[in-house]
Each structure stands twice: as C-alpha cells, then as structure tokens.
Image: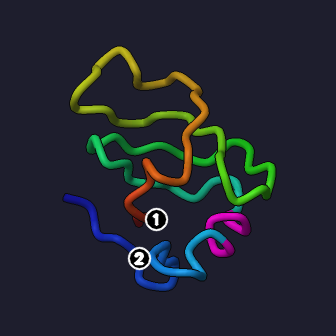
C-alpha cells in the first residue's frame, strides 16, 4: 500500500477544506485501491477529476479520467 502523506489529512472538520485546496498533479488513493492524479479540482470541497494511473479492481480504468467524490478518497500519496 502506498504511503499516505500526513500533511494532507482529509479526516475531520478540516478535511473538506484541505480537499478543496488540493492542486492538480497530486496523487490520490481511493477506497477501492485505485490511484489517480488530480486533473481538475473545481475547489468546491465535493469532487475532483482524476486521471487513473493504477486500478487493481478495474485494469481498464488506468488512463481514464473520472469524477471522484470526497467520500471515495483515502488520502494523498507520494
């Protein structure tokens, strides 16, 4: 499992604020084990668009862009 970066703690009250400010290029780990890079963050604290680089559950998902909601994100990874 990739290392989750502590400086981007998405838990608790501040989690939505941190999520809102995530910048394109950061990599996120999702609850299904997929990893993707942020392409677009509309800064609404609700969703982002990821370009998937790894998706153990769905091999065909790699290289695809998809809208991801806050609840699906485990954390920012190196």
Tell me the SS state at disc 1: strand
Quarter of the rendering occupied by the C terminus: bottom left
Q: Is residue 51 above or below residue 45?
A: above
Q: Is residue 40 above or below residue 23?
A: above
Quarter of the rendering occupied by the N terminus: bottom left
Circle number at residue 66: none
* Residue 20 x, y percent position in the rendering: 71, 64
Q: Which residue is mark 1?
A: 76
Residue drawn at 41 percent across, 76 percent down: 5
Residue located farthest toward the front when viewing the structure as drawn: 13
Q: Is residue 18 magenta?
A: yes
Q: Would you say 54 lies left or right of 24 here?
A: left
Of residues 44 and 65, the one nearer the viewer is 44
C-alpha span from label 2 to label 1? 6 Å
Quarter holding residue 24: bottom right
Q: Would you say 34 lies left or right of 41 here?
A: left
Tell me the SS state at disc 2: loop
Which secondary structure dominates the residues rendered in magenta?
Answer: helix
Q: Specify the segment rendered in magenta.
A: 17-22
Q: Is residue 19 above or below residue 15?
A: above
Q: Which residue is mark 2?
A: 5
* Residue 4 x, y percent position in the rendering: 35, 71
Whether pointer 2 and pointer 1 mark residues with C-beta atoms closer than 8 Å, the reply is yes
């Amino acid at each position: 499992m990739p290392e989750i970066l502590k400086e981007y703690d998405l838990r608790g009250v501040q989690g939505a604020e941190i999520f809102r400010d995530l910048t394109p290029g950061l990599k996120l780990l999702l609850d299904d084990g997929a990893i993707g890079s942020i392409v677009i963050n509309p800064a609404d604290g609700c969703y982002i668009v990821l370009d998937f680089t790894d998706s153990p559950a769905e091999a065909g998902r790699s290289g695809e862009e998809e809208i991801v909601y806050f609840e699906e994100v485990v954390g920012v990874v190196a």
